[in-house]
Image (cartoon, helix red, strand yellow):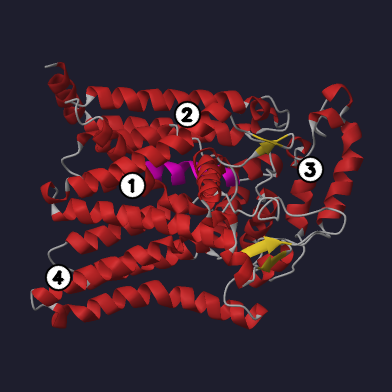
């Protein structure tokens, strides 16, 4: 009885709850974005340099040095707290920012001079994120923002991007799982406190979850639609192109798109409609592939490589692995595969930001993230297989595509792990990963494009494990417990940034 009353309440107030979740998610991202000082260890200074150049109408080239604007702002507002141990300072006292201690100004001017002679490591990245954020940065200047306030204005674009992603996640579940109230409420609930810290920084990973989510929605809608139009096909294709031109690892959507198109073609062929519809499907593929191909041709003409990988590998001092090294990589052992999964899923959930050269993490939460991800995804797979005949064709296909997208992302990062290794910097040793001691790429943010499919599968697995209990109450209680763990862990590990004198709350 209580469960039915709860379900009735949720159905009546569903849209209001989703709006509340979007509001809470936006507030959380805003507060944490304001709390983290500039410039984080996740290449934030490099990303900002490219944003600044796009804001000035420049297209960066490989090997280009940091620009004047970015060098000056990095010199003035970069916090030393990301790159030094606390023990390196006398009595652990971090130098105050220049606006609180004018004796720091000469050191800040020296940092600016140093930055002007540094190579920008993100110069050849796909352009969409930098173009959009560059326009937002320029708008901040137009309305009169300068210095640190302009930097945080640029970062605050993350807030509407995240809120839109929460709304899109709800729309996806409502469209393709219309009878699953728990998923409709649970997925946006999880996103309110999902602790991936890349959303608090300047990074081209920020747009991945939103834009890949658009691709999932449009591609699955293309599959289930009774009729297709040129408009829907072109929109789907362009969404694919935009997602890939934000971050190359967003190509994890490509296998899913290929399966969707082939599955739709099979249905049309069996209904003897393929002859009249294939031009629309060709338009979809052209809209998705031609913009990416044009960018790759531009890269080839500028640096001799089809993607930015040639420059990036040189910049990071990476070399390709030989086939013998690939075949003997530890990832092909049970222990190596388990280690890779554990490390990747930890960072997929909570990010990689460091503070005083230590990763912002809590082992208890990390173990929970990694272990429940494996457990719940395996449960979701079992639920799909065992209940195959009971599910509608649309739900079966949607869930299968979610699995394909996430598995493609894992496979992509696994391939990056086995296909390259770092070589030593003179006097500085190896890049932290992939190195001979740690031959894995475990940056979960690289597959943040699969965030929405992952959470749908994660909660499907939890739902299946709780199938002996009827009603939604127990399920939402479990989600609530997960939210408490995520929020509590993030608050505790983020105490350093929140108390920093370099963050938005302390700007002059």
Query: Between disc 3 and disc 1, whose residue precedes?
Result: 3
Dividing the image into 4 quarters, which one contains the C terminus?
A: top right
Query: Between disc 4 and disc 2, whose residue precedes?
Result: 4
Dot 1 alpha-carbon crowd within 10 angstroms: few under 14, some 14 to 19, many 20 or more: many
- Say which mark, if any, is on residue 486: 2
Q: Is residue 125 visible?
A: no
Query: Between disc 4 and disc 1, whose residue precedes?
Result: 1
Relative to 418, 183 lies left or right: left
Q: Mark 3 points at which residue?
A: 76
Give the quadrant of residue 361.
Answer: top right
Residue 427 coordinates in the image, percent (x, y):
88, 55
Name the front one of labels 2 and 3. 2
Query: Between disc 2 and disc 1, whose residue precedes?
Result: 1
Label 2 SS: helix
Question: What span is colored magenta in the figure?
Answer: 154-166
Q: Answer yes or no: do the residues labelled 4 and 2 have beta carbons within 8 Å?
A: no
Q: Mark 4 points at which residue?
A: 267
Label 1 SS: helix
Chief secondary structure of the magenta portion: helix
How many numbered marks appear? 4
Dividing the image into 4 quarters, which one contains the N terminus?
A: top left
- Say which mark, if any, is on residue 168: 1
Name the front one of labels 4 and 1. 4
């Amino acid at each position: 009885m209580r469960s039915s009353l709860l379900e009735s309440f949720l159905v009546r107030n569903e849209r209001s709850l989703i709006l509340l979740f979007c509001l809470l998610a936006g507030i959380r991202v805003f507060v944490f974005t304001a709390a983290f000082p500039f410039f984080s260890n996740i290449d934030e200074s490099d990303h900002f340099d490219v944003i600044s150049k796009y804001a000035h109408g420049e297209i960066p080239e490989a090997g280009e040095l940091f620009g004047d604007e970015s060098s000056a702002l990095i010199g003035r507002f970069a916090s030393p707290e990301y790159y030094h141990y606390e023990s390196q300072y006398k009595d652990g006292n971090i130098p105050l920012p220049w606006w609180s201690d004018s004796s720091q100004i000469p050191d800040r001017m020296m940092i600016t001079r140093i930055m002007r002679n540094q190579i920008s490591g993100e110069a050849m990245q796909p352009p969409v994120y930098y173009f959009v954020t560059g326009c937002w940065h320029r708008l901040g200047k137009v309305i009169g923002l300068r210095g640190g306030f302009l930097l945080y204005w640029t970062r605050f674009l993350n807030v509407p991007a995240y809120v839109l992603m929460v709304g899109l996640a709800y729309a996806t579940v409502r469209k393709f799982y219309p009878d699953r109230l728990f998923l409709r409420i649970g997925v946006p609930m999880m996103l309110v406190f999902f602790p991936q810290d890349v959303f608090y920084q300047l990074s081209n990973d920020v747009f991945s979850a939103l834009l890949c989510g658009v691709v999932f929605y449009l591609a699955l809608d293309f599959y289930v639609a009774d009729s297709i139009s040129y408009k829907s096909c072109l929109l789907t294709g362009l969404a694919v192109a935009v997602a890939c031109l934000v971050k190359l690892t967003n190509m994890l959507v490509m296998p899913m798109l290929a399966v969707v198109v082939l599955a739709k073609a099979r249905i049309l062929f069996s209904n003897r409609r393929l002859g009249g519809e294939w031009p629309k499907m060709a338009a979809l593929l052209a809209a998705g592939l031609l913009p990416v191909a044009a960018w790759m041709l531009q890269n080839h003409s500028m640096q001799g490589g089809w993607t930015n990988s040639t420059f990036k590998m040189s910049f990071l001092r990476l070399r390709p692995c030989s086939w013998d090294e690939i075949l003997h990589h530890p990832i092909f052992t049970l222990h190596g595969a388990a280690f890779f999964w554990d490390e990747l899923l930890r960072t997929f959930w909570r990010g990689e930001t460091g503070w005083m050269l230590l990763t912002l993490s809590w082992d208890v939460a990390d173990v929970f993230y990694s272990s429940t991800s494996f457990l719940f995804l395996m449960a979701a797979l079992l639920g799909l297989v065992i209940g195959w005949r009971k599910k509608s064709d649309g739900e079966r296909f949607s869930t299968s595509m979610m699995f394909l997208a996430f598995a493609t992302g894992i496979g992509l990062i696994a391939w990056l792990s086995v296909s390259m290794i770092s070589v030593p910097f003179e006097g500085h040793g190896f890049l932290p990963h992939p190195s001979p001691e740690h031959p894995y790429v475990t940056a979960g943010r690289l597959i943040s494009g699969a965030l929405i499919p992952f959470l749908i599968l994660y909660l499907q697995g939890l739902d299946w494990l709780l199938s002996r209990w009827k009603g939604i109450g127990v399920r939402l209680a479990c989600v609530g417990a997960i939210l408490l763990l995520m929020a509590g862990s993030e608050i505790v590990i983020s105490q350093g940034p929140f108390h920093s004198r370099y963050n938005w709350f302390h700007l002059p």
